Amino acid sequence: MDSQDRYICHHAFEEDAGHHGAVTPPVYQTSIFTFPDLETFSRAQLKEREHYIYSRGLNPGIKLVEHKLAALERGEACKAFASGMGAIAATLFSLLRQGDHVLRINQTYGPTVELLDQLGAYGIAHDGIRGDDDIEAALRPTTRLIYVESPSSMLMELADLDAIARLASTRNIITVIDNTWATPLFQKPLQHGFDLVIHSLSKYIGGHSDVVGGAVIGSSEMVDRLFAVGHQLLGAALAPQNAALVLRGLRTLPLRMAEHQRNALHVVRFLAAQPQVLEVHHPSLASGQVANWAEKQLSGHTGLLSFRIQQPTYSRIARFIDALQLFRIGVSWGGYESLAVSPMRPDGSGQPLIRLAIGLEDIDDILADLARGLNALDH
Ligand SMILES: *Cc1c(COP(=O)(O)O)cnc(C)c1O
């Protein structure tokens, strides 16, 4: 783990001396900030993204989270949002115009696709390809934005970030990546030439399944634009209390990610060796050119993976999941707790996969629980 990243998660930007030595920054539970005179107020209003005026715009705890996330991604600026979807909606709303086309690469988070479908009513088109498809051939003269998930969150697919950024820069196309799977600790897409990085803070960064939040990181110029339009006008502002929970999550992010990685690699090895398991989706198993992408882009692996069992009918998937005792059934991921879920529906639609979020429990307990699930398939 990068020592600079550890310093950012712990001490960086916290030298404020005004808190009586409090090691935890106070929560400024206030909607407005007042000024000693009108000129100070007027000057602050000229740069609302950086001044405390109103908590829909900025608040001290939120600014601290933004500085840390920008530094972790090695970006100039960050804007925090009330949720990952708030960040995604603000990004798309701020950057796209009628007639624009969005090219999606890899399976996109479901609500993001639904949002792009909604934008169809405003004359914005989108379609999707895989990371190993011909990206140049999929571009249209109207392509304004390339939206990537790498790794994606259901099949953990990768894409070649350097190649995408290079291609986009020759066409004046904005590149956006949802980096939620990897966290900034394991992947820094701005260093591969991407323009904007989006995170759902509700996952590993919050880290305790008790907060929903989002963030966008990029150049000051881009983040200014997102702030003025998508943040201020759509209004999905992170609440001060939630910023404090995100900050608390960041303190232990390096420790937690090391442990999620260790547990996940054990699980991947275990599942890949089981005769009832057809394939396991996790970037640590990548081969060929995908392994090269993983090698140059990912400095670690997180705990979200999926796999396919033999004869993956809904009833067999349910038999596996319902036999689990340690794993709980639920969406999202990133907390201490292991979770299992399937995108398949009782009518047989949806992907016949089991998705696991590997938590921080004892690895022997985790493996024993998965063995229990596999045993249930034989009975
Ligand atoms: C959860 C998630 C989101 C949405 O974030 P919310 O905080 O739930 O709004 C976006 N992208 C990915 C990959 C996610 O997992």
Image (spheres, rainbow, N blue to C red):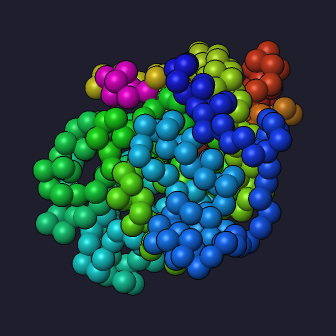
**Residue at the extreme right:** 325
Residue 296 falls inside the magenta stretch? yes
**Residue 117, position as x, y percentages in the image:** 43, 73
Magenta part of the protein: which range?
Answer: 291-298
**Residue 173, position as x, y percentages in the image:** 22, 57
Q: Residue at x 28, y 26 (%)?
A: 289
Q: Is residue 173 left or right of residue 283?
A: left
Q: Residue at x 59, y 79 (%)?
A: 38
Q: Residue at x 41, y 46 (%)?
A: 76
Q: Is residue 339 visible?
A: no
Where 341 sits versus 324, above or below? below
Where 178 sits versus 8, above or below? below
Q: Is residue 371 left or right of residue 90?
A: right
**Residue 50, position as x, y percentages in the image:** 52, 60
Dividing the picture into quadrants, the one containing residue 369 is top right
User: Is the stretch drawn in magenta largely helix, strand or loop?
Assistant: helix
Q: Is residue 90 left or right of residue 348?
A: left
**Residue 245, position as x, y percentages in the image:** 76, 47
Q: Residue at x 24, y 78 (%)?
A: 99
Q: Is residue 372 left or right of residue 202?
A: right
